[in-house]
C-alpha cells in the first residue's frame, strides 16, 4: 500500500514499477531545472570580464563593479523572494517570472556600450537571478523524500549545466562579444517556459496579512535563535571571504607563474565537483552534517596551502591538487549546508531560509571577500617597471590561515542535534493542507 501524498507536493516513493516511474519522472524534471538554472549563469558570468575588457575596453574597476552586482543582488533580493514563495506565489511560477524578466534585461544589456547602462541592467538582472538559486533548491526539497540521499544527484546537473555553457562559449570563441549575454538571455527564456512545467510547489505558510516580516523573510531569521544554526550562518559568511580569493585571483595567479592553458585546467574544479557531489549521500551516512561541513572547510585550508607552495615546474601537482579540491570545498560545505538548512528550519519558511543562506554567502560574504582579497593582493604586490609583481605565497597563506580559524571555531561551537527537533515534513505538510 502506498503512503499518502498531498496534492501539489512531492510524489511518494513505493516499490512498484509505477512508483519508480513516477519518481524517475520527477527526478528528470528537477535535474533539467538545475541544468538550465546554472547554464544561464555560466553563459555570461565566466566571460563577463573578457567582454567588458576586450570588447568594450572597460577598466578593471568598472569590470569589478559590474561583476559585483551579483553580490549586491544576493543581499537585496533572496529573502524577499523566498517570503513570496513561502506565502503568496508558487515557487515554479515565481521562477518563470524572474527568468522571463531576466531574459529581457539580458537582451537589453547586450545592446549597451556605456558603463552606466550596463551596470544598471546587470544590477536589475542580478536582482532577478540570484533568488532563483534558492527557489530551485526549495522546489527540489519539496518534491524529494530523502534529501540527504537524493538532492546531490539532482544538484549535480547544475554543475553539468555550468560546464556545458563554458564549453559552448569556449569552442564558439565568443568570449569577447555580447553574444554570450544573448545566449544567456535565450537560455533564461527557455528556463522561464520550462519552470511552468515543474511539479506544483504552492506556498505552505499559513495564510495571513502581508507585512514587513514577510517582505524581509524575518520568520527565517528566527532560526538564528538556535545556537548551532547561528554558528553555521556565521561560518558560512566567514568562509566566503577566503572563497573570493579563489574566484577572483586563481586565473591571474596561474597565468602569472607560467601555467599553460590555465582556464582549461581550472575546469578540473568543476569536474571534481561532479564526482564528489554524487558521493555526498555516502559521506552523509558516515560523517553526519557536522563533519561534512568541517571536511569542506578543511579543503579550503588545503587548497590555499597547495597554491602557496605549488609552482608550474616541480610542484605542479600541488596546483592540480588545489584545483581538484574545489569539488570538496563547494560540495561538502555549500550543498551540505543547503541540506542542513532544509532539515533545521520550520517547514513553512524553508524557501525564505534558503534565501537567507544565499544572502549570507553569495551576498554579504562574497562582497566582503571581494574587498578583503583585493586589499591583501595589493598589500603583497610591488610595481616592477611597467608590471606588477605579486608575492603569491604570502597572498595564498592569508586565506589558508583564515579558513583554518573558521574551521576551528566551527568544530568548537557547532552542534547538529537541533536538526532532529524540526517538525517532520509530512506533519507540516498535513497542517498546511488542512482547511483548519
Image: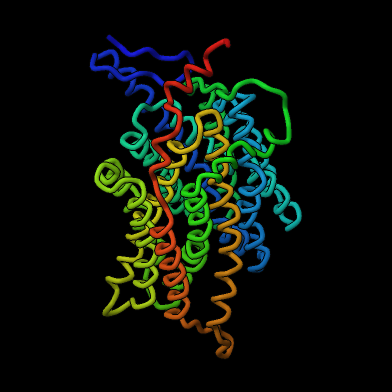
Where does the image place residue 370, in percent across and percent down from the top left?
Answer: 58, 64
Q: Residue at x 30, y 71 (%)?
A: 318
From where the camera sits, is residue 385 visible? yes
Where does the image place residue 188, in percent across and percent down from the top left?
Answer: 56, 36
Q: Residue at x 37, y 49 (%)?
A: 331
Where does the image place residue 403, in percent across and percent down from the top left?
Answer: 43, 66
Nearest the eye: 118 or 81: 81
Question: What scheme was used to colour the molecule?
Answer: rainbow
Q: Residue at x 45, y 63 (%)?
A: 406
Where does the image place residue 145, in percent across and percent down from the top left?
Answer: 36, 26
**Relative to 95, 413 lies left or right:** left
Total labels drawn: 0
Q: Quadrant of residue 148?
A: top left
Nearest the eye: 49 or 213: 213
From where the camera sits, is residue 267 visible? no
Q: Is residue 348 above or below residue 181?
A: above
Q: Quadrant of residue 26?
A: top left
From this viewpoint, which residue is outermost toward the bottom? Answer: 385
**Relative to 335, 361 lies left or right:** right
**Relative to 26, 252 lies left or right:** right
For the N terminus, which image quadrant? Answer: top left
For the C terminus, which image quadrant? Answer: top right
Nearest the eye: 124 or 415: 415
Q: Is residue 47 above or below residue 321?
A: above
Q: Is residue 24 above or below residue 252?
A: above
Q: Quadrant of residue 82?
A: top right
Amino acid at each position: 500500500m502506498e503512503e499518502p501524498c498531498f496534492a501539489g507536493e512531492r510524489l511518494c516513493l513505493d516499490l512498484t514499477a509505477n512508483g519508480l516511474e513516477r519518481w524517475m519522472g520527477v527526478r528528470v524534471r528537477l535535474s533539467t531545472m538545475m541544468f538550465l538554472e546554472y547554464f544561464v549563469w555560466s553563459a555570461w558570468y565566466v566571460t563577463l570580464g573578457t567582454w567588458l575588457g576586450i570588447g568594450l575596453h572597460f577598466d578593471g574597476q568598472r569590470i569589478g563593479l559590474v561583476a559585483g552586482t551579483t553580490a549586491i543582488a544576493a543581499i537585496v533580493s533572496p529573502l524577499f523572494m523566498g517570503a513570496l514563495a513561502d506565502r503568496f506565489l508558487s515557487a515554479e511560477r515565481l521562477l518563470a517570472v524572474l527568468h522571463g524578466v531576466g531574459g529581457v534585461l539580458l537582451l537589453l544589456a547586450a545592446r549597451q556600450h556605456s558603463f552606466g547602462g550596463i551596470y544598471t541592467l546587470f544590477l536589475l538582472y542580478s536582482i532577478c537571478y540570484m533568488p532563483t538559486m534558492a527557489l530551485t533548491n526549495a522546489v527540489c526539497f519539496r518534491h524529494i523524500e530523502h534529501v540527504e540521499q537524493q538532492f546531490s544527484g539532482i544538484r549535480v546537473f547544475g554543475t553539468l549545466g555550468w560546464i556545458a555553457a563554458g564549453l559552448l562559449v569556449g569552442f564558439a570563441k565568443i568570449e569577447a562579444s555580447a553574444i554570450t549575454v544573448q545566449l544567456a538571455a535565450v537560455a533564461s527564456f527557455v528556463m522561464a517556459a520550462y519552470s511552468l512545467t515543474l511539479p506544483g510547489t504552492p506556498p505552505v505558510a499559513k495564510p495571513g496579512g502581508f507585512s514587513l516580516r514577510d517582505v524581509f523573510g524575518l520568520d527565517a531569521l528566527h532560526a538564528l535563535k538556535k545556537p548551532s544554526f547561528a554558528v553555521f550562518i556565521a561560518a558560512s559568511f566567514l568562509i566566503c571571504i577566503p572563497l573570493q580569493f579563489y574566484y577572483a585571483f586563481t586565473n591571474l595567479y596561474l597565468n602569472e607563474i607560467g601555467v599553460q592553458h590555465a582556464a582549461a585546467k581550472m575546469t578540473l574544479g568543476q569536474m571534481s565537483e561532479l564526482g564528489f557531489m554524487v558521493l555526498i549521500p555516502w559521506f552523509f551516512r558516515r560523517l553526519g552534517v557536522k563533519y561534512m561541513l568541517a571536511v569542506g572547510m578543511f579543503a579550503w585550508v588545503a587548497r590555499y596551502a597547495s597554491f602557496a607552495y605549488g609552482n608550474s615546474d616541480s610542484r605542479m601537482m600541488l596546483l592540480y591538487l588545489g584545483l581538484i579540491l574545489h569539488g570538496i570545498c563547494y560540495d561538502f560545505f555549500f550543498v551540505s549546508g543547503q541540506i542542513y538548512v532544509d532539515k533545521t528550519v520550520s517547514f513553512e519558511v524553508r524557501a525564505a531560509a534558503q534565501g537567507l543562506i544565499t544572502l549570507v554567502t553569495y551576498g554579504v560574504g562574497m562582497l566582503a571577500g571581494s574587498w578583503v582579497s583585493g586589499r591583501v593582493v595589493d598589500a603583497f604586490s610591488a610595481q616592477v617597471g611597467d608590471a606588477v609583481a605579486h608575492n603569491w605565497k604570502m597572498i595564498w597563506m592569508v586565506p589558508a590561515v583564515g579558513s583554518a580559524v573558521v574551521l576551528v571555531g566551527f568544530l568548537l561551537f557547532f552542534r547538529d542535534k537541533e536538526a532532529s527537533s524540526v517538525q517532520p515534513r509530512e506533519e507540516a505538510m498535513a497542517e498546511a493542507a488542512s482547511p483548519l
